Amino acid sequence: MKQSWWALLAQLGLLAVWTCIWQVQGCGPGPGYGIRPRPRKLTAMHYKQFVPNFSENNLGASGRAEGKITRNSERFNELVCNYNPDIVFKDEENTNADRFMTKRCKDCLNRLAIAVMNQWPGVHLRVTEAWDEDGHHPTGSLHYEGRAVDITTDDRKTEKYGLLAQLAVEAGFDWVHYESKYHVHCSVKADHSVAVEKGGCFPGWAQVTVAGGGQKTLSSLAPGDRIMTLSGTGHIVFSQVLLFLHRNQESRASLLALETEDGQRVALTPHHLIFLSPSDKLHHSEYQALFSSRAKKGDYVLIHTAGAGVRPSRIISVSVEESVGVYAPLTEDGTLFVDGVLASSYALMEDHRLAHWAFGPLRLLYSVTQLLWGETKEEQESTENKTTCTKPTLPGSTLVLHKAGIYVNNDIPIKQDNLSAALRTDIKEYHSLQRQTSDVHWGLSLRYRRQMGKHSLYALANRRSLVN
C-alpha cells in the first residue's frame, strides 16, 4: 500500500521531535547526551586470575599465534605506532618498540588510558612491554605480533593492579591476566579475526520459539516473525523481530557453547551478551547482561520452563567450537530465548540497557509505521484467503461460485446458463471491482461498497428469475 503524503510528514515530524528531546536531555548534568549512566561497581581481579577463563591462545580468548613479526617482514606494516600522550611507555630499548602494536590493541589501550585517569585522577597508564623484536618472550608469545602488552600505573602502586586488570577487561581486551604482582598482561585477537569483525551473533542452526509454540531456526527466521522473549516487566511474551543486526550465512565464527544442568545448550560469540549470575538466589531482574566470554562453570543462566516462566540453571560446561553462518536478530524487547536460554539481542557493548535505549528511535519508528498503515499482515492474509477460496458475488445474497461454472444461491445449485444476461454482467463488474479494490488505498473502499449496494438491490429483484 503506497504511503500518503501526510503519513510521510508525520514520520518526519516524529523524528524531529525525538531529535529535540535528545538535545534537551543532553543539556542536563553528567557526561554525554541522554540518560546519565549509572556508576558501575567494579570488582578487582584476584592475583593470578585471567578473564575469560581459557588459555590465551584459545579461540574464545585472543586466539592462536600467527607468527613472529620483524621490521623486515611484510606484516610489519600491519602494526601502528601509539603516540598517545596520556600513556607512559617505558621503552627501555630506546627503539620505540613498545609503541608498536596492532590497531585493535591500540584502540583498547587508548580506552584503558581514559578509564585509568577517570578512576585515579592524576594517574596515567604505563606500558612496560608491547611488541617484542628482541626475543625476550617464549615461543608463540603474542608480544611478537604486537597483540599483547604488559601494563602498570605510572605511580607503580601495586595495590591498584587488581582493579587495573578489571578496567582492562572493561576496555575490551580479549584476554587479561593478573600474572604478576608487578604488572598485568593483556592481549587481543588478530585484526582480521572473524570474531572481531562480526561482533556478537548466534549460529544459524540455533532455534527460537515462535508464536504458536513451534520452533524455528535463526537461518529461517525473518523480520516480522514473533518469537519468545522476556519483557522489561519480567513476563514471557512473543515479540516481533524488527531486523537483523547481522546475518551472513557464509561467515565463519568461533563460538562459546554453554551447557546447563537441565540439558540446554546455547552457542554464541564471545562478545554477545547473555544474562548471568553467580548465584541461583537472585531474582531474574537482578541477572547481569555480560559478555559470554565471562561465563564459567558454576554460573547461572535463565531458562524457559514449561509453566511459561523462567528459572535459573547452572552451567556445567563451557567449550569452544566453530560454525559457519552467523545471525543476530533484534526484537522489540531486546531479548530472546535461544535454545531455551535467555540472551540479549546486543553485543560488543557490555551494557544491555544502554544498547536497548540506543535503539529506541528505531522501535518508535516501527510502532508509528504499524499505527499509520492500518492493515496488519494477518488481516491482509485473511482478506486474500476469503477472496481466493469463496467469491461472494453480490452483497445481500448468497450467490457463490463453485467449480464447473455452477453458482449456488441459498444452497440451490444453478448452472451458469440459467443466469440472466443482466445478472451475468453484474457479476463480471463486481469481480472486476474486487480486483481493483485490492490495488487502491483503503480509504477508497467505501466508494466501491456504495456501488456494490446497487448490485445488491438488483440481485434481490432477480432472485425469482434465478430460481425459475
Image (cartoon, rainbow, N blue to C red):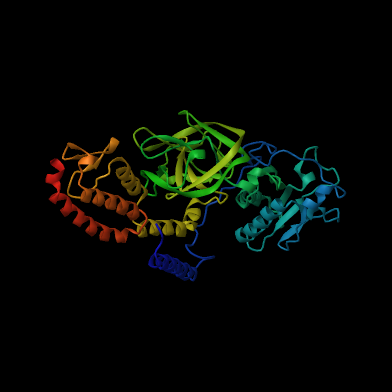
Q: Quadrant of residue 66?
A: top right
Q: Residue at x 40, y 46 (%)?
A: 239
Q: In the rendering, at what x and y percent does residue 362 appear?
A: 46, 57
Describe residue 212's horizontal placement relative to residue 165 as left or right: left
Placement of 120 over or under 417, stated as above or below: below
Q: In the rendering, at what x and y percent does residue 106 appear?
A: 71, 54
Q: In the rendering, at what x and y percent does residue 373 appear?
A: 36, 58
Describe residue 80's horizontal placement relative to residue 168 as left or right: right
Q: Residue at x 60, y 51 (%)?
A: 170
Judge whether residue 112 can be spotted in this image.
yes
Q: In the rendering, at what x and y percent does residue 285 appear?
A: 41, 46
- Number of marks drawn: 0
Placement of 19 over or under 103, stated as above or below: below
Describe residue 262's horizontal placement relative to residue 56 as left or right: left
Judge whether residue 155 can be spotted in this image.
no
Q: Residue at x 30, y 54 (%)?
A: 433
